Amino acid sequence: MELNRIQAGVPGLKGTSGPARRTQAATAGVRPSRGRPADVTGRIGRGWDAAQIFLDPRASAGTLPTTRTIMETQRTPAYYVWGPDHQVRGPAELPALVSDARQGRLTADTWVYRDDAGAWRRAADWPELKALLGPRTPAPPASGRTPEQLRRIKIFAELDHAQLATLLNYLEPVDARQFSVLFRKGDPGDAMYSVLAGEVRAREITAGQERTLFTLAAGDSFGELALLIEGERATDVVANTDARLLRLPAAAFARIVREEPALAAPLLLAVARTLAHRARALGERLVADLTLAQVAGGISV
């Protein structure tokens, strides 16, 4: 079931104050303070069962999907989750949220909407989730990084909490100053990099002229091919800003394959999918360029 656009008034929004007004504002798609979900464009996330839901970014305060408009005959509460990618995922039933909480995908501070209550709350504030998401103080890994930070990196997004915690033991933090060169064309390809913060660019220099090939920001990775085959770097990569990165050496990846089979399989699949999507995008771009050249009469294909 797909709901193209849902708008319903939220009674009592005017004239309220304090926590009640902030809660209503959050459900209405208004961005109050402290990170509540707002201006939502939803999509189905992996592991969720039903429809897409959209809140119009241009909608005025007081718009909210109601139980009646979403599913007239719904008998059990449906939940919607405000994800780290700023997308609404759902609807889902409680067992799906419990599973995600146990795997670390749902944290205490994740915003969750329950349709029968008509409100957004932090996951730990819902009684049915509180026991799973109570205060915890796990010891941070030696690198100072956490599994939650890794989940912001696209290539690692499908790994569960335990797999991310294991992966941290194989990653090396890298701090790059603005304009510093991470590697140059022709250098040995010996690691994959992931951007935690900042921005880098891949460049090509021909006849003294620099051309930017692509720019990468937080959540992006590059150099994945170095995990699978030995070879030389095809381009320079330079920091556009001060940047924080994580480096996965090819030797460490080989150790993961030998020592951590539960991590190796999903990580290898994630790398393969990333490379496949990139190859398809490059192929489509090449076809478009050739077609344009043909139309212009430059070459014959």
Image: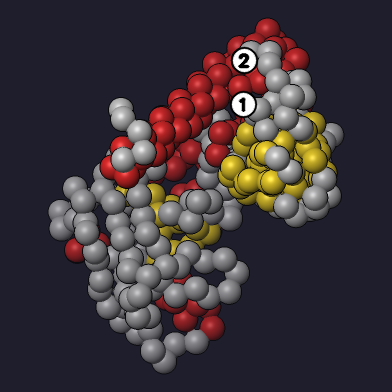
Q: Is 231 placed above or below 242 here?
A: above
| Nearer-the-camera pick, 241 or 125 | 241
**Where is mark 2, residue-wise?**
228
Is residue 55 visible from the viewing direction of this image?
yes
Q: Which image quadrant is residue 280 in?
A: top left
The answer to whether the residues at label 2 and label 1 have Cβ atoms under 8 Å apart is yes
Distance from the alpha carbon under mark 2 to that under mark 1: 8 Å
**Where is mark 1, residue-wise?**
224
Q: Is 39 placed above or below 291 here?
A: below
| Nearer-the-camera pick, 189 or 152 | 189
Q: Relative to 109, is 111 on the left or the right?
A: left
Residue 253: x and y in percent read 69, 17
For the residue marked with disc 2, what is the amino acid?
A: Leu
Crowdedness near tag 2: few (<14), some (14–19) or many (≥20) residues, C-alpha within 10 Å = some
Residue 51: x and y in percent read 26, 48
State which quarter of the image contains the C terminus: top left
Q: Residue furthest bottom?
A: 15
